[in-house]
Image (cartoon, coloured by chain):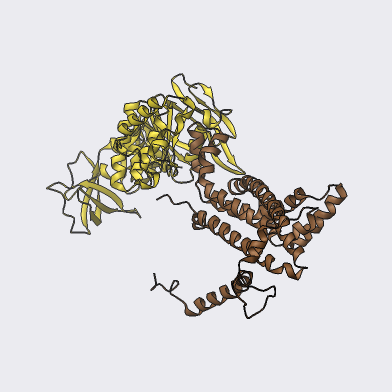
Amino acid sequence: MSSDAFISIQNVDKYFGKFQAIDNVSIDIGHGEFFSLLGSSGCGKTTLLRMLAGFENPSSGEIYIDGQPMSEVPPHYRPVNMVFQNYAIFPHLNVRDNIAYGLRRQKLPKAKRNEMVDEMLALIKLPEYGDRKANELSGGQRQRIALARSLILQPKVLLLDEPLGALDKQLREQMQLELRQLQRTVGITFVFVTHDQEEALTLSDRIAVMSRGRVLQLDTPTGLYERPGSRDVASFIGTMNFFEGKVSKVEGTKISVDAEGLGALHGDRGERAFAEGDRIQVAIRPEKLELTEQQPNGATASVKGTLKHSAYLGERSHFFVELDGMEKPVAVSAQNKLDAISVTDDSRPVWLSWSPESLVLLGAD
Amino acid sequence: MSDSYIRKKSRPLQVYAIIFIIVLYVPVLFIPLFSFNDSIYVRFPLEGFTLKWYGELFQREPVWNALMNSVKVGLSVSVISTLFGIFAAKAIARYRFPGRGPLVGFIMLPLVVPLIIFGVALLVLLSRLGIPLSLWTVGLGHLIVCMPFSIATLLPRFEGFDPALEEASADLGENALWTFWRITLPMIFPGVIASLMLTFTVSFDEFIMAFFLNGTQPTLPIYIWGQLRFPQEFPAVLALSSFVIAASFLIVFIGLWINRGAHAGTIKVD
């Protein structure tokens, strides 16, 4: 356990019968961090969150929160609170009583309790809603009340299980912003579960990408997007073009690759160890490719292809370009500027160019 | 709604339903009808309206004793079977344990097995154990009869509310007992009331178990049965039966009405 880790998940496995939901996961989360568990459904992210809350126990391994081992601690004694996927607002209580629910054990005088609830109602911007019944609330309001109900207990960690999943797009974007602001205001550690990669990128300090019970990569949003460590991560986060390649020469940190469709490439291998003759994947994001009608200046790496199809999306356009020797067309994304390439005229020769540092080299896996 | 194929009105079905209800309940209506008839013979034509059978009823000590016996047994049985029913329904709805399916079937068995079998079996068992027959043994028999009703009433309540509510309560710092008191009980409360009323009625009206297991203190149905031997008592028995019918209808109706949300499968939230 590193010294500054506030939550430390150490070598945790979880079996449900014979099914292994979590496979040897170790994660350290710092104090005050906005940490996301990202993955498609069934990847184990919710199971991991429920283990932090205490609703499931690890089959092996240990979870430490604030230095304390948690496996013997039942949910009602843990210094964490959770916002449930469907918010789990108590339907028989009004908004006030929902928010004050966890305060019973603190045996506060009534005035103090009311004051705390009022503060929370103000924090979530629903000051007039105290006497509403749970069934008179919209999805966004329920979400805020679930937040307030947890935050009033001043937990050390707030766990959020896809809290924005049930909201429509506009409200979701607004709540993302508010959630991030709220986290900065209260300064507590958030562990956030989501399957929405955009949401994870927007909100998080760091993200653990999970698949089949394992952590594929743990990095900052920029790190995950710009330097994905595997094809799985690269294709899960955003769109990515992949090219089969073979290492032709390694010299210090310099590397040369023959890639199908792109030809001979020269770049920097970074910290990855490649040997001559290795089969690798070369990947590049659609927005890192530049599409031109004329061949660019000699110095820039470029390749000629055929524009097969384009889609106009308002602020940007997507183009699909066929290259010789490639089955799948290459996706290109470009902002629509005044001088943008005309998108009406398909099936004509175009040039793709890129800067060498925008290429990502991945081991063939 | 009326234009949808599956929901359109079906004339033959309506007629069938009406005939069904008539066949079911008209015979029952003869009981209150003749209880107001000014004759000790149950036959047409009716001979005039009277309340004297009801008046006579109130002056009879044994009727009141039998009534009190039934109420005592009914109240105890309804409380105990509802209590057990809550535990059983919660276990069935919330936990996956081996033998769950057979267990549920086993609990529901008294609904389909002839009560005379249970009655005889319990009678044999109790006499072997040397336990004297009394209202307690009647209550024991009624508990077996009433448990399925309790569980069947409470189970949809448990299945209809999100287990995340109980988890949320634990998450907010409440232990199992407080969670039950503050969340579970309020959520299933209509089912609890319905179960209390339903099981009380079942116990109050039950004859076979009471017949086998009662000692010297008859319950109301046993008392009525005993009076049938005396023709001159018959109109008073009709008056008494009318009371029992009215009370049963009322209690069951109120119980079902309170619990009406349960059949939708979920408690309305949105």
Q: Which quadrant of the figure has residue A360?
A: top left
Residue A15, how many percent across, how many down?
59, 40
> Which color has been applied to chain A in this rendered view?
yellow
Q: Nearer the viewer, residue A349 or B51?
A: B51
Q: Nearer the viewer, residue B111 or A215?
A: B111
Residue B63, how many percent across, how many down?
70, 57
Q: Nearer the viewer, residue B243 or B19?
A: B243
* Vertical arrangement, residue A100 with respect to residue B72, above or below: above
**Residue at left offset 35%, top offset 25%:** A187
Residue A64, visible in the rendered structure: yes
Residue A269, how many percent across, how many down?
36, 32
Residue B101, visible in the rendered structure: no
A173 to the left or right of B177: left
For the view shown, which residue lies furthest in the top direction? A3
Residue A122, how many percent across, how many down?
30, 32
**Residue at left offset 82%, top offset 54%:** B123
Q: How many marks overall?
A: 0
Q: Nearer the viewer, residue A312 or B254?
A: B254
Q: Which quadrant of the figure has residue A90?
A: top left
B248 to the left or right of A98: right
Q: Which quadrant of the figure has residue B44?
A: bottom right
> Which color has been applied to chain B in this rendered view?
brown
B21 to the left or right of A176: right
For the view shown, which residue lies furthest in the left direction? A338
* Vertical arrangement, residue A127 with respect to residue B190, above or below: above
**Residue at left offset 33%, top offset 34%:** A121
* Vertical arrangement, residue B74 with respect to residue B230, above or below: above
